[in-house]
Each structure stands twice: as C-alpha cells, then as structure tokens.
Amino acid sequence: MTVTGLPFDDFRALLRDLPGPDTAALVAARDRDRQLTKPAGALGRLEEIAFWLAAWTGRPPAVTRPLVAIFAGNHGVTKHGITPYPSSVTQQMVENFAAGGAAINQICATYDLGLKIFDLALDYPTGDITCEAALSERDCAATMAFGMEAIAGGTDLLCIGEMGIGNTTIAAAINLALYGGTAEEWVGPGTGSEGEVLKRKIDAVKTAVEFHKDHLDDPLEILRRLGGREIAAMAGAILACRMQKIPVLIDGYVATSAAAILKAANPSALDHCLIGHVSGEPGHLKAIEKLGKTPLLALGMRLGEGTGAALAAGIVKAAAACHSGMATFQSAGVSTKSDG
C-alpha cells in the first residue's frame, strides 16, 4: 500500500504492524485442556474456540463483558430503486433497537450480552457509488476512527453488526471489487429484492465497480469509494479490537465485507476474528471462503443486526465456561487413560 500523506496513512501504519497472538497464554490453555475430565478432542471446536480466546486475550479463556455493536448507515445508491424498503427504515429500526423491540434485543437478553447502537449520520446518505465515491478519504478515515471508539467502555468479546437499507448492494460491490467474478454471483435478495428490483441492484453493482475500476487496487480506496459509514466503522472497530486484545465475532454478509477490506490490506488482519454464522444471502458463503474462515452457525438467517454473531457468542461463552469450569482428572479423582 502506498503512502500518500493523507488521512489513511495512520491506518496503513496500523495494518502493517499488527500484534500477534499471546503464545504463552495459548500454551497454558492447551496444557489445561489435556487435564480436563474428557477424552482429548471430545469437545471438538469448543476446544479450539477456548484456545482462540486465550491466544487473543492473553489470559485464561473467559467471556465476562461481551458486547454487540450495531453500526447504522444510509446509502445514496438506494435512489436507484435497488431495495423494496425506503432509507427511512434505517432510522426506524435504530429506534426499534433502542426500544428493545428487535430480534437482536431478545438474543442479547437471552445470552446476557451488552448492546450499543451507533447512528452514523443517517440524515446524510453516502455518495451514489454508481457515479461518485461514497466518502472522501478524510470522512472515511474519521468514520473508521469513530468505529475504533466503540470499544471504549470495555469488552472482552465484540460482536459486530449493522443496519442500513441498501447495504447488501454495498457488500456485493466490495466483494466484486476485491475478488472479481460477476455481479450476479455477489448480489442477493437482501431485504427481499426480486424481479425488476433485483435487476436494478445487479446493474448498480456492475455500474459502480466499472466506474471506480481504476482505483480498486487499494483496499482502503475500495472502502471509501464503494463502502458506507457502517462498513468503515465496523472495519475500524475490528482493527481496534486487534490492538486491544479483544476477540471479535463477525456477523453476516455486510459485516464480512468490512472485515474483507482489512484482510485484503494484511492477510493476518482477521486472525483474532471468527465468523458467527453463514447467512442466507447467496454470496456470504463464498465471501467467508475467500477469508479462509469456517462459520460457527448455519441457520439460514439474513436479518443483520448482529443477530448471527450474537447467537454465536453463546457458543463462545460456553466454550470458555467448559474450559475454566470443568474439573481436572486429578481434582475430580477420575482415572486417566490407561497406558496399557
């Protein structure tokens, strides 16, 4: 990535020098796992999740302050009729989150997760990506910095989610720019686009990527030209978690597109992240595969709001509890495997 002397420079520097895992904490977690009252490997992926928590927090696996952060943004591209819902629904859903009436509120209550909602200038949609950049470099960098502040109150597991009418169009454009292929491969129904609406959505993605084609060799340029405020903020939050030793659960198609920007900038940028679920959006599984990840859940959901990541947080909490709460063979007086 080139140095320009512009606002992205700080993020380029961070992405070049990311902290790695805590190997001592990882070794300690593996040593304890071998002593727990179970056959080796019997908890399957739960054991790997516990090791992941240790490696990226630098302490024994525990989840005591989990947080779901939802970033909400509006998009100028919706003027092309690419979604059956008006952009005003973004604000209405933010109010629904605040009132406790959304699916994410019920999941957070069930799994004892904190919830924060970030309204990102909803009255000022981003630029229409079919004919202009979504954001200036300065605005994009400022929004990433805002996203980095999402963890300021403290958390030890961040679940990343979003709300934004039109943002599956944005996610499809980002994936097409990053990975190539055709717009049809990356565009799905989102909030229910079909027929002529779906055709307009595909056309918008094609037009946008073609319009910006001379500037798509730099991931941060892809972010500012084709992204949105919630995408930029999620990227910032994921990056901040890496710097602060906080593991991350990524939600659906839109959140994954934000993560993909970081992965394109540094192949190790998502090592502290897991994908909470694979959504019903057709391009999501392909996007996850491009990241080299395996989702924790596959429930056919495509709601957004961080719902898949929040459900996966229950699994992560269980993995930590099993690791820390189970007795060892010695403490429980259980015989170990015979050598004979």
Image (spheres, rainbow, N blue to C red):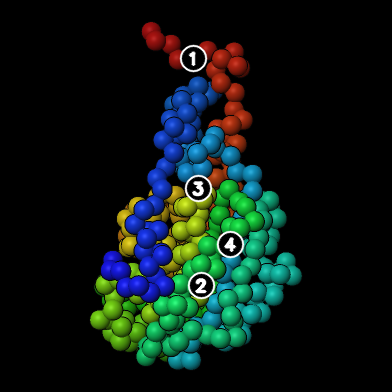
Badge 3 is on which residue? 245
Label annotation for residue 262: none
Residue lying at 33% horizontally and 69% vertically, measured from the top left:
219
The reply to whether discs 1 and 4 touch (Cβ–Cβ < 8 Å) is: no
The reply to whether discs 1 and 2 touch (Cβ–Cβ < 8 Å) is: no
Q: Position of residue 212 (x, y in %)?
A: 31, 83
Q: Quadrant of the N terminus?
A: bottom left
Counting residues from the start of the chain, the first of labels 1 and 2 encountered is 2
The reply to whether discs 1 and 3 touch (Cβ–Cβ < 8 Å) is: no
Badge 4 is on which residue? 150
Q: Position of residue 172 (x, y in %)?
A: 38, 74
Q: Amino acid at mark 1?
A: Thr
Q: Secondary structure at mark 1?
A: loop
Residue lying at 61% horizontally and 55% vertically, measured from the top left:
67
Q: Position of residue 241 (x, y in %)?
A: 50, 54
Mark 1 vs mark 4: in front: 4
Badge 1 is on which residue? 336
Residue at the top extreme, as displayed: 340
